[in-house]
Amino acid sequence: MGIPNLLRFLKPFIEPVHIKKYAGKRVGIDAYSWLHKGAYSCSMELCMDPKSGSARRYISYFMHHINLLRHYKVVPVVVFDGGSMPCKAATDKERHRKRELSLALAKEKLEQGNTTAAIDLFRKAVHITPSMAYQLIQTLRSEDVEFVVAPYEADSQLAYLTTLDPDQGGIAAVVTEDSDLIAYCCPAIIFKMDRFGNGEEFIMERTLKTDKASLSFRCFDKKLFTGMCIFAGCDFLPSVSGIGTKRAYSLISKYKNINRVISTLKLDKRYSVPDDYADSLWKTLAVFNHARVYDVKSKSLKHLKPLDEQYLNYLDGDLDILGPPLSPSIARGIAEGHLNPVTLEAFDQYSRTISPIEFIHTSAFKVANQCGSQEMTQKSYIAIFSSRESKENVIVNDISNGGQKCQKGILALGTFILQKHSPPVDCNEVEPKNIPENNPFKKRKFTTDQGQEMVKNELLIDLHDEKSILSCSSLSQPSSHPKKFMELLSIGQAEYERNSVVTETPVSFCSSLTEESVKSMPNGVSSKRQKKPEEVQY
DNA sequence: AGGTACGCCTCTT
DNA sequence: GGCGTACCT
């Protein structure tokens, strides 16, 4: 919802603009705005049969706008929303309830044959799902459009990108419909861009420096500006009843200090200020300043602005209100569009019907091939894959035999089996840390399908934890350097990711294997692999 | 005057 | 999500 009435309030500072002004520049796109508008054209299809062709009209809508930008030599960088913030859970739940209600009514109307009424209700029932975003991501990939999925809010990710240089992945402006970007003090925002490229531009510096229509932000710094927005009410914190943009503005310009505004409000009998309002407001300010964002360069989570002592105090050590931290591998999986940011599961785990074990062999081959005759021999291979039993903490029994029991993200290295813990489904859950101690190896008995008892070395590591991987790698491969291991790991991961998107089907992937290369596979490849890969189906 | 609650619209042809 | 509007303080 953004900040109610903020755009109207700041109208004097908003000027018409055409997107061609940003020719040659990189411009961030708030994917949600266009997804939402695009979904309007196919709301019924999306509700009833999301897999149908006509349910993909929202993608055409989106791509039209992308092509428009490209036509004007603007480089689009699409930013998607990631997981929802804990503090918005209540709002989210309420919206969900309303949508469910509309959906039920819509289906009812449809059965009664009242299509017009049904469509109207379907429009209220549509919401943008991670799956829809993923469909779009696949198109963006094929069209070579840069994108990133924010760990949490797209707004903060976009605000972060505006702070970077273009050659570091930075953007010059943001195209969105959401006034929250103003609260983040985003330097340049284009609102209401239409299909011809006309929009309304908000420039932060211009707003802070010029007086218009008896409004002046000259005495405002960015902190006060964000503070004003929060006082007026935002998604994270509802405003004190009776306070909107105008009163928030006059209070801030009068006292120029956030705590003084709060004390004044508390003394004023007209308003009822909750006891914890000051606390909540400072926390909200901390969210606008230090939200978790993804840094493409380091491939890990960062804070929008580096955390300082002051804000750490406001947060009272409770960093989780910024959204729970994510490990680099998970954050990257989300950012690059492979993991559903809400469930943390791989998007395409159901689209693949080749068995996990087949997939391990095929990608292992590729990895082994890329390693050549380096110190990691053909016998060592890495594969990361998804299987359907992703929520169980099952350990794969035998890499060459089992497969069916594999869980998401198992890493197989040489003769050892490395297990990744399944990511917590509940985001509030603490990530299991199973960092191996001095001797992470243990013998484990297991029974093969043929009833034989076998003992295998088994190593449990936490793939969420890079340190854990490093310590294991030096133990399991004394001859290889941890860095080499990490390199291999990233090749394996990249291999998996590359092949888990539609650009290469398992069919074409498998058919690239030669008989000879398959023979050299560590555990011997099941003969299945060589029989007509064309039969493999999705 | 300013805030709030409510209903309407966003697309495509 | 935004916007306009009628109604309330």
Image: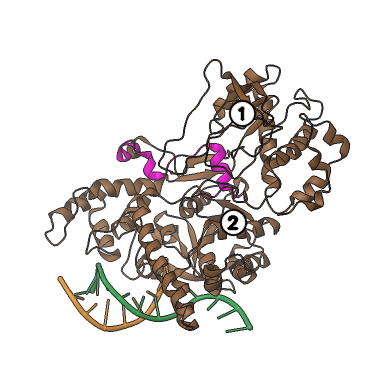
Chain colours: A brown, B green, C orange
Residue A1 appears in the figure? no
Question: Which is more N-terminal, label 2 or label 1?
Answer: 2
Foreground tag (1 vs 2): 1
Please check the rendered image and state whether residue A97 is part of the magenta-colored stretch, yes or no.
no
Q: Amino acid at mark 1?
A: Leu
Residue A323 is marked as none
> Mark 2 and mark 1 in contact (Cβ < 8 Å)?
no
**Is residue A37 placed above or below A505 in the rendered structure?**
below
- The chain that hosts pointer 2 is A
Left or right: residue A401 versus residue A266 is: right
Left or right: residue A324 versus residue A317 is: right
Q: Secondary structure at mark 2?
A: helix
Left or right: residue A214 versus residue A206 is: left
Spot occupied by residue A42 in the image (x, y as percentages of width and height): 56, 73
Q: Which residue is mark 2?
A: A134
**Is residue A419 placed above or below A149 in the rendered structure?**
above
- The chain that hosts pointer 1 is A
Q: Bounds of the magenta span?
A: A312-341
Q: Nearer the viewer, residue A320 or A385?
A: A385
Q: Residues within 10 Å of mark 2 (few under 14, many from 20)?
A: some
Q: Which residue is mark 1?
A: A418
Spot occupied by residue A142 in the image (x, y as percentages of width and height): 70, 57
Q: Amino acid at mark 2?
A: Tyr
